[in-house]
Amino acid sequence: MKRHIYSCGYLLLAILSLLVQSVSSQPTVERDLLEAIQKIKAVDNHAHVLPARSPDSTEEERSDPLGKTPFEYPVRLRVTNPEYLQAWRVLYGYRHHDMTADHAREGLKAKLRLMKEKGTNYPSWVLDQAGIDIILVNTPSLGPGQNAPRFRWVPLADGFLFPFASEEERIKWFRKQVGLDSLPTGLTEYMDTIRKRLDQWKKAGAVAIKFAIAYVRSLDFAQVSDEEANRVFEHYRQDGKVSANEQKTLQDFLFRFMAREAGREGLVVHIHTGIGAEPYFNISGSNPMLLETMFNDPTLRQTNFVIVHGGWPFEREAGVMLIKPNVYADFSAQTFLRSTEALSGVLRGWLEWYPEKILFGTDSYPDDTPLANWEEKLWLATRTSREALALALTQMMKAGEITRQRAEELAGMVLRDNAAKLYGLGKH
Ligand SMILES: [Zn+2]
């Protein structure tokens, strides 16, 4: 009898919860799963967070406390995105419900005060607020307050794809990052320089190298023989110039060479894919599908690759590449470009395919927008990721694809364990 009453109770509860779900237009998330996900100390696979610094006394008095983005950003990244209010509330104790200049300035003052108070501990404090344990920082070098084991270095390697001086600003900048200033005497010597640098980077604590080459050319890196690469190199040494095709040939060769050597050093190779941070970036040349012949190269099987930003808007193409044992994808940048619901769709597709290969990442980066800067982006992107993950996993549970226990396990893998395994973290 008692048993019967209980089951009636359960039935009633089930009907009630169904009713609640059907009247609510919001997609529902299993509450306790979300709570469990919020407690996971994450590993951020890709970000450009800044070191600690002492703020200038004039900073808080700026007439435009919200600042300006370098071009008209997509909606969620705009400084007026009301979601930032919540970030300010949590991070700086912001009490207003609007962004008027006076109120925002008050928020900025609170932020700069905190920055001063925390000193070199500020970068770690920001990570704590977002529940991030370890972050991979893609930067020329780590700075004050960015120390291992929490801050891990990912240097930019593109400069080595350009052994010859160039007038193009971006190429000049890339070359400067790796300290290239003179013409190498020959390809063999140049390859040796690269090998040594990779070794130095590894010894200095780097866990991966990053290529942002999609900002300069498309990602189709053909297989090129040593002879062909040597011929281009010698042509340049004789004539002081080579054709665009020859430049591509040499870059193709050097890219695969670096990927191979990085693998030998135990450095993971990060490749920017999908949209870029400027309106006239060549999106179609940044499709991860273009990397397939390189992923299939039998001489690169010792190298682990990460498709950074998960290729968006080519997230399906990025996802399908996860079938290759040495290919991973992070969903950085999608975390602030896309809505929580849209991101959950991407995650569900990937989770149903190769969940062991998915990495959380924010792509948090600085701008001249004091209250929509790396800190706020980091906080917001992490929250979006946790919610999107909870939503995708709830839907998979409802569809009978996974158990509640597996849902939590998958969340742990995506937010932390997959990265820990890939980079050998957590052994400190
Ligand atoms: Zn980035």
Image (spheres, rainbow, N blue to C red):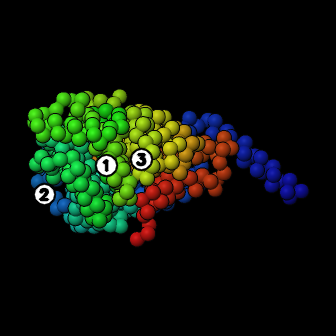
Q: What is the quadrant of residue 212 in the picture?
A: top left
- Amino acid type assigned to the residue bearing label 2 in the image: Asp
Q: Nearer the viewer, residue 276 or 206?
A: 206
Pick whichever of labels 3 and 2 is earlier in the sequence.
2
Q: Would you say the beta carbon of the disc 3 residue lies within 8 angstroms of ligand 1?
A: no
Q: Residue at x 54, y 48 (%)?
A: 355
Residue 339 vs 260, above or below: the answer is: above
Q: Which residue is mark 3?
A: 299
Can residue 83 be seen at all in this image of the molecule?
no
- As drawn, the label of residue 56 is 2
Q: Are marks 1 and 2 in contact (CB under 8 Å)?
A: no
Would residue 248 be visible to someone looking at this image?
yes
- Identify residue for label 1: 258
Which of the two discs, 1 and 2, sits closer to the camera?
Answer: 1
| Mark-to-mark CA distance, 3 and 2 | 51 Å
**Quick one: 27 or 98, which is closer to the camera?**
27
Mark 1 crowdedness (10 Å alpha carbons): few <14, some 14-19, many ≥20: many
Q: Residue furthest bottom?
A: 428
Tag 2 secondary structure: loop
Which of disc 1 and disc 3 is earlier in sequence?
1
Q: Amino acid at mark 1?
A: Met
User: What secondary structure is found at the residue carrying circle 3?
Assistant: helix
Alpha-carbon distance for marks 1 and 2? 41 Å
Q: Quadrant of residue 213?
A: top left
Considering every residue shown, the one lying at the far right of the view is: 1
